[in-house]
Amino acid sequence: MTWFQHGAPASIFLLYLFLWKTSPELVPQLGQEDSWIEWLTVAAFGSASVAFALVGMKRGWRDGWFAWGLALFCYFVAGEEISWGQRLIGFVPPEVFLQKNYQEEANLHNIFNDQMGPKWMLVFVLAGWGLLLPVMRLAGARKLLERLRVVEPPIVLAPWFVFSLVLLQYYPFEMTAEYVELIAGVLFLVTAIPLLEFNRRTTLAVIAPLVAVVAAASYPALEDSFGSRHKLECAEAETQALTSAIESGASLRGLFVRRSSDYRVHTSIQSGLLKPEIVQALDSVVCEGGSNNPNRRRYALDPWGQPYWLYYVRGADRLTGTALFYSFGPNRRYDSPEGRIDGTDDVGTRSRPLRLDTHLPE
């Protein structure tokens, strides 16, 4: 079992280091939303949740309360990681998430980003549960922790928690936190597994989240191939409407003084790059593919419940600029770095060259 406890987190670190040295551009690419790094994180925390729940059931409510708490925590993290199925199912989240969550996703951790971002939440968990509690046990608090029925990782796993914290602090590449989250999920899982008495039923229960994740991760790809024609037509018509609106002067000075930008449409409005009334252009589009929830168009979401994006780049002559409004398309993934939507499932409409002297309001 020791080889598994060390081998699982080590494999992720080795993958990260390998990509760092050979293909650093793949580090953020593999760590983006709905990538396999994220889905494996969901699987790790999901399996850890089941494992800790089984430990809690085995010990009973009095002795297993801490294990139940860890099970609920891991379940919460798994749900938050996939925004409780928003990108999978394609629903429009309640308005509080659209207002408060800059990513327009149905999760809580990004709502409190200004107070305590996901990175610092992760630091707290790694340092507190992963290091402080095992050190307390070694420092003479063993009886106290046993009396409280605390479940903490074995001290032999401490180096992996330290390495994770160092990686978060150094942060060599964008999306590094996604890899650390996967490592954290694996560390929760390898802590829980030795506490179980494995039989056929237990094994099936622990691996069930992995099977569910494989099926869920495949769903957007299937919809990419066999998805609704109406949703594609709707996204095409709506991006055309947004493009027509910016060609008619729905932009603000803040957009054109930039060399380039790539933001959600709603974020662009909040940042003073687009006029708020640009979303009214969506109301002129009649399509069958999108949700009838009025918040979808009010917050510029596409038919799959994901934000529409604006990619703007200033021309080499500095007198013109081009805007591209686009949707992530059926697979709900960011496939268009620097506005390159050709060859992807992303749906978008590019504007004609916009003359800055006619689009810069006084």
Image (spheres, grey):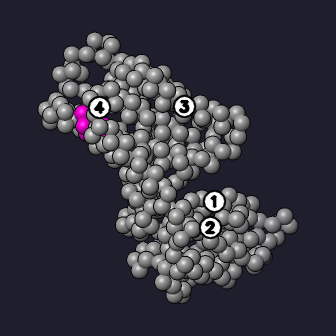
Chain-order first, disc 4 or disc 2: 4
Find out whether the residues at labels 2 and 1 contact each other: C-beta distance under 8 Å: yes
Q: Amino acid at mark 3?
A: Ser
Q: Amino acid at mark 1?
A: Asp
Q: Residues within 10 Å of mark 2 (few under 14, many from 20)?
A: many
Task: Find the residue positioned furthest to the right.
Answer: 317
Residue 255 image offset from top left, x and y in percent: 67, 66
Find out whether the residues at labels 4 and 2 contact each other: C-beta distance under 8 Å: no
Q: Residue at x 74, y 64 (%)?
A: 313
Q: Nearer the viewer, mark 4 or mark 2?
A: 4
Q: CA distance from mark 4 to mark 2?
A: 45 Å
Residue 169 numbered tag: none
Q: Taking 313 as reference, is 57 left or right? A: left
Q: Residues within 10 Å of mark 3 (few under 14, many from 20)?
A: few
Residue bearing the label numbered 3: 11
Rendered view: 167 above or below 302: above
Query: Which SS does the magenta portion mostly show?
Result: helix
Q: Nearer the viewer, mark 4 or mark 3?
A: 4
Secondary structure of the residue carrying numbered label 4: loop
Residue bearing the label numbered 4: 198
Q: Residue at x 76, y 78 (%)?
A: 352
Secondary structure of the residue carrying numbered label 2: loop
Chain-order first, disc 2 or disc 1: 1
Find out whether the residues at labels 1 and 3 contact each other: C-beta distance under 8 Å: no
